[in-house]
Image (cartoon, grey):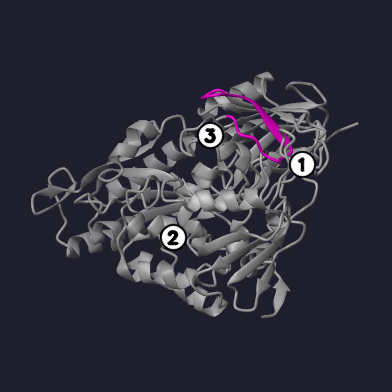
Amino acid sequence: MTARRIRTAAAVTLAATLATTAAACSKPGGTAGAGTGAKDSAVVGIAYEPESLSPLLGYGKDGNSKIFDGLLAFDAGMKLKPALAAELPEVSADGLTYTYTLRQGVKFSDGKPFGAKDVVFTYETILDKKTNNAAKTELDAVESVKARGDDTVVFTLKYPYAPFAERTVLPIAPEHIAGKQDVNTGEFTTKPVGTGPYVLTGWSKGEKLSFKANPGYWGGAPAVKKFTMAIIKDDDVRMTRLRSGDLDGAILPPNLAKAFQGDKSRKTYAAKSFDYRTVTLPTHNEVAGDTAVRRALDVAVDREVMVDKILGGAGKPAYGPVPTDSPWFAKGTERVHDLAKAKKILDDAGWKPGADGVRVKDGVRATFPLWYLSGDKLRQDHALAYASDAKKAGIDIRTQAGTWEVIEPRMKQDAVLAGGGSPGDPDFDQYTLLKSSLAGDGFNNMAWYDNKAVDTALEAGRRTNKEADRKAAYTTVQQELVKNPGYTFLTHIDHLYVVNDNWDTLTTQIEPHDHGLASGPWWNVEDWKPKK
């Protein structure tokens, strides 16, 4: 079999389509402002924290974990580049074998050498049925992973999975540490050791993650010697702390980021993303699970108003997980706001207006709860706008705030204002979002969506490397979501970050839903240089 160097088609296409947006930012200029003031440290405010810091459990699977490296990494334009691998992989002509030659001389932060055995350990552990990694289906194509000496790893696939190389950005764990612990509960989950540019120095749950530069980092010691991620779930509090000087930078919703316009000491960075907001419509709820109700809500919602009023124009309407400017988007699946059509759908299905305006069918009132995450202003605003639009069609949606501990046990019956999105390939997001077999598996398929045509198309899309066949499969998925939308997709959101103007070389990537933690202008903090 012949071999070729790969730069995955999906990554190349995405980069070509969206590269011009990858580093979008406004540059009001100015001098250094508030914050730590130190030239070798930075404190940034983020909204969420991970459940675990172990890549074996899913941490950092899309790259940029700071503590770890993958075999490959994404650059600012989402093109693959070597990381722990010395070069891009060789791929067999049939697309079933990927061979990686490893970078020499790399060490974990404890001084132990990195090698092929660590790669094999990482992938085999993730795929082990005993490992609690909700993202393991993304590696379903892997038949085996074998070491060939200390510096070569060979992956053999069951089927030609087109975006496989993009999945090898996931971090590599040290066998000599993680392999001696319980993978799900061991100390490694909170005190990890990796090959990355930073070393974790502390994790105060709900408060902050603290890092120091790894002086032995194979890519060169970072100029930012201390880096702290302050975990501030409430958007208003995050803005206040940035303004007061507690933070050097923060992710903010558009309406709060506007407060810093004209501040010459700070810059606002706008990152294009695949991040969407959606409402789950649980199959097990007798109202939300009704296809007519789902279809009516899909056209009752005014997405354009949400983009204008909630996002201040920093985003676009969403009709599914695939953004409208992606080459994978199926033209013709856009849903136009049409209240009259929504009412007719409900009328024809037997949902008749009651005395109070709320529709009723067979004694069942068209009402259900919609949960959103406490302190998340964007989700709150989306939920309230969605409920308002639904009310005009005669559907009573009762919004409620709660923590994930409160919300998760209710997801089978109650609707949730959820978020998601992953750049690179349609399989990454659609499979876990819509595959019926994943219903109830943590935050996978939160709506318990069950559509046989979608299941078939999802399998077809991930089991071939022929672009035309994949395009047809994911077009089918999007068309089926028009017929029976198990979710009401609302908006795709541009992420906004406000950062003190103390540093050079800040850029943004095209971002996933998991914003702020591994993304943001600090996706490449190891490359920042203090302004002179």
Question: Residue at left 47%, top 61%?
Answer: 140
Q: Are marks 3 and 1 in contact (CB under 8 Å)?
A: no
Check disc 1 and report its element: helix, strand or loop.
Answer: loop
Which amino acid does the dot numbered 3 rest on?
Thr
Closer to the chain start, of discs 3 and 1, is 3
Relative vertical location of residue 69 with respect to residue 404 in this rendering, above or below: below
Farthest residue toward the right? 532
Q: Label 2: which residue?
A: 431
Q: Is residue 200 magenta?
A: yes
Question: Label 2's element?
Answer: helix
- Percent across and percent down for residue 473 are 45, 73
Say which amino acid is labelled 2: Tyr
Magenta residues? 191-207
In the foreground, 515 or 102: 102
10 horizontally vs 268: left or right: left
Is residue 185 part of the magenta span, yes or no? no
Q: Which residue in the structure is indicated by mark 1?
A: 506
Q: Nearer the viewer, residue 439 or 293?
A: 439
**Residue 171: horizontal and vertical position, in percent?**
62, 47
Residue positioned 33% across, 32% down in the render: 406
Question: What mark, if any, has residue 189 been given in the picture?
Answer: 3
Q: What is the x, y in percent for residue 500? A: 74, 30
Residue occupying image coordinates x 71% and y 39%: 108
Q: Is 259 left or right of 485, judged from the image as shown?
A: right
The answer to the question of whether label 2 and label 1 lie on touching residues, with beta carbons closer than 8 A, is no
Image spot of residue 215 (x, y percent): 80, 33
Q: Is residue 54 left or right of residue 266?
A: left
Mark 2: few, some, or many residues within 10 Å (few <14, many ≥20)? many
Label 3: which secondary element: helix
